[in-house]
Amino acid sequence: MKEYLNKKQFRVQFILVSTFLLISCLTAFLFQKKDTIDLLDSPEYTIEAFSDVWDGGHSQAEILSRTKDEITYTSILQEGMMFPYAGIQIRKADSTFFSLESYSLVAEIFTNKQERLPIRIYSFKGGISDSTRRNFFPLYHSIYKVGKGENNLKIDFDDFTTIPEWWYTNNNKTESDIHSWDKDSVGYISIFSDAGFQIQDERTFKITKLLLVGDYSRLYGIIAIFVSSVLFLFLSIHFMLYQKQKRIQLTLKYSDDFYFEPKPEDFKSQIHAFISEHYSNSELKAIDLANQLKVPEYKIGEILKDNVGMTFKAFLNHTRIEAAKQYLKNSSYSISEIAYKTGFNSPSSFNRVFKEIVNQAPGEFKN
């Protein structure tokens, strides 16, 4: 198998397949490439305070300072709603939808104590009409724990799969009404304090990084499956071709198509085995056989005459032509490919020798 893999034809095909895979993967990546969006510094996005006041509650949220590099805000929960909330929300400045498909949220958040940090996404799905009630829209949330001081978060939106039970109750919906959320139709991302916080306890948050960055984990998985499948198919085909070639060589080794005068010496089987195994080597010489038989090179002519009744070149050509006949009848290789596979340096020399031995051109024999 190692000898087969080292052949020029296999190496060229492997390079071509590898080049195809490289170009395909690069094209897929460039097609899916996402520009990083700095939400703190983007004129297309607005960050604003929000609270349950929108739904008749009394909680408060206030932005204390805001620059292109950081935003600091406070939130205080007040009684008045079963599930009070207050914090900040991110939306498009023109109030249009935006896409989170293939994005992750990277955030750097400072807090003055250990917190639970709910993050909520409002998705505007088809079939859910507009409303003056904010929480009418399907919302998905996930909760992250942050400690005192600096916290670096990478938030994968694939983790957002849960809609709160109260949402179904308030909007008279069931789980069967919402099958999956539409990442291309997002209205808001909210970062807030919720009922897990103490009432009237002021919380301070400082965000110094808030980025939407390309998330290529799913793409990498698809690429890995694609590359593995193509390579598996390529190697499987060549393994089958290798096995077929070995069967042809074994058929040739035990073929009775041409007669050799039996001799009592042990050289005949060794000569036959060596030539059958190495006939595809276009550089094979008599000295290689002499080295195999462990005899001086000047003796090889006499040994060949005594054991196979031919010169080295004649016996090698007969062996190659027998192999070529097997390929012509049992494979789909072209005549040029068979010429090189059986050790000839060119198709023209192969055609000449084939016609001398078989009294037919290779094409005539194949047909």
Image (spheres, rainbow, N blue to C red):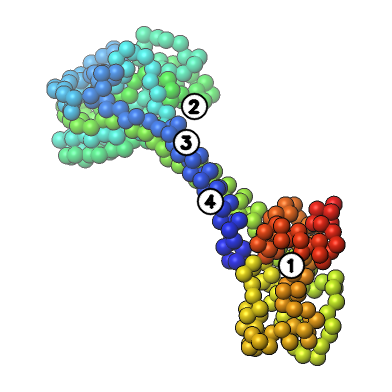
**x, y (%) of residue 196?**
27, 31
Q: Mark 2 points at which residue?
A: 180
Q: 116 and 270: which one is in front?
A: 270
Q: Name the residue under label 4.
A: 15
Q: Mark 4 or mark 2: name the one nearer the start of the chain.
A: 4
| Three-letter amino acid code of the residue under disc 3 | Thr
| Three-letter amino acid code of the residue under disc 2 | Ser
Asked if labels 4 and 3 touch by Cβ distance under 8 angstroms, the answer is no
- Compute the Cα span from label 1 to label 2: 65 Å
Asked if labels 3 and 2 touch by Cβ distance under 8 angstroms, the answer is no
- Compute the Cα span from label 3 to label 1: 45 Å
| Residue under the point 42% across and 28% down | 101
Q: Mark 1 points at which residue?
A: 320
**x, y (%) of residue 51?**
26, 18
Q: Nearer the viewer, mark 3 or mark 1?
A: 1
Label number found at residue 27: 3
Q: Is residue 138 visible?
A: no
Q: Nearer the viewer, mark 4 or mark 1?
A: 1
SS at mark 1?
helix
| Residue under the point 28% across and 19% down | 45
Mark count: 4
Q: Mark 4 or mark 1: name the one nearer the start of the chain.
A: 4
